[in-house]
Image (spheres, rainbow, N blue to C red):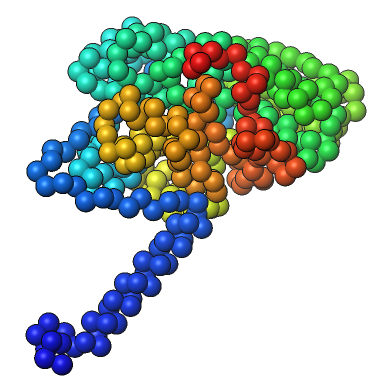
Amino acid sequence: MNRAKQSGCPLSLRRLRELIAMVLTFAFTSYALFAGHTIARAAPAEKGTDVISIPIVYVKEQRKRLPPLSLLDYPPDNEGIAGAELAIDDNNTTGRFLKQDFSVEMISSPKRDELIEGVVAKAKAGVGFFVVDVSAETLLALSDALKDLPAVLFNAGAPDQNLRESECRTNVKHTAASYAMLTDSLAQYLAWKQWRKIVLVSGPQPEDKLYAKSLKRSLKRFGLKLLAEKQFEYQPGSHRTDGGYEQVQKQIPTFTQGLPEYDVLLVADEAHQFGDYFAYRTWNARPVAGTHGLYATTWHPASELWGASQFQNRFNRKAGRHMKPLDYAAWMAVRSIGEAATRTGSGDPKTLIEYMLSDNFELAAFKGQKLTYRPWNAQLRQPIFMATPKLHVTVSPQPGFLHRITVLDTLGIDQPETECTAFN
């Protein structure tokens, strides 16, 4: 009784506060585990130790792009960097207990030489981590420029398959999904639905052809039959203002009239110049999928699975808009650095990269399971959403597709298939 009076608080009230704290701790831990996350227990920092600064640079290539068909598809100015900034906040939440300080700045230019000059200067000044949204050609040039420096590039924006295969680099990691991962995800779902008879319409742009090539590989891999392929010709940048929807309404049925009987029409329009014209306008009443209609994506702004609601809300409050796949890829890149720094207690790029490629590394990313990097090409394994503009439809890998190590390796180039030898 005297002890309770000395504490300035009745014993029963203090005990009640302890019980409430225990309940809240249990509830938070249970929610995090249900959401697929691990609670990082920060070890107390030693007194007198200096703060470890881990600077990160976001590199954005200002590329000339054809205007999209829809006014809704113009990219926001802060696309990509907004995801990196959210991840910096997440890293520093744990980092402040471990005396680790994360920061990000951006280098942006339409000129490849300026980007290379800026990145090399930052690397020589001690920056070890670069999250990049650049073309495949620029990424390879950056990689070659940094080959003798202790720095690593995280590819957040280029899905090109050659970056993971014949042109793979040991100083490049990929948080962006490859074309093979995206098209395998779609082909798995079509196979699961038993929609096996396919026709393909592709565009003339180089990225359209890369996506179409990957689609054909995936169709063959999962036992689907490509009945016919046609190329859709158009004038880039022309949105058919002289006739509008009436002209399109007549053109698309005529274009698709002669196709054989099919289950699904696949569209390969990475440039986003014609794909939206096909849904509801084809000669036969069949679903449209590929880059438009039902499409594969690493992230969807309507996802509420695995604790994603609070993640979406935090991004909305910070960026003032919905999260896009590029934001998500940048977030995963910066969080990978933060997770490795937390587990190793280091800020050294070589140490962190070695840890990321080890069996000990895991990244919780609101996808229901831990994500890891493939040791043979440094591609981040991850489930892929099949989605429409409003909602996701399903998540691949699909049920029944098995793998001896992880079902995530049924998406994309598996180790026995890889042409990447750099990591050997």
Q: Is residue 410 above or below residue 367?
A: above
| Front residue of this view, candidates 240 and 349 | 349
| Front residue of this view, candidates 250 and 76 | 76
Q: What residue is rendered at 54% in x and 46% in y?
A: 369
> Residue 411: percent from the left, percent from the top?
64, 31
Q: Residue furthest bottom?
A: 1
> Residue 406: percent from the left, percent from the top?
62, 37
Residue 186 is left or right of residue 51, and the answer is: right
> Residue 402: percent from the left, percent from the top?
71, 38
Q: What residue is rendered at 56% in x and 10% in y?
A: 166
| Front residue of this view, candidates 388 and 248 | 388
Q: What residue is rendered at 53% in x and 22% in y?
A: 376
> Residue 399: percent from the left, percent from the top?
72, 44
Q: What residue is rendered at 23% in x and 82% in y?
A: 14
* Quadrant assignment for the N terminus: bottom left
Q: Quadrant of residue 121?
A: top left
Decide if residue 207 is in sight here: no
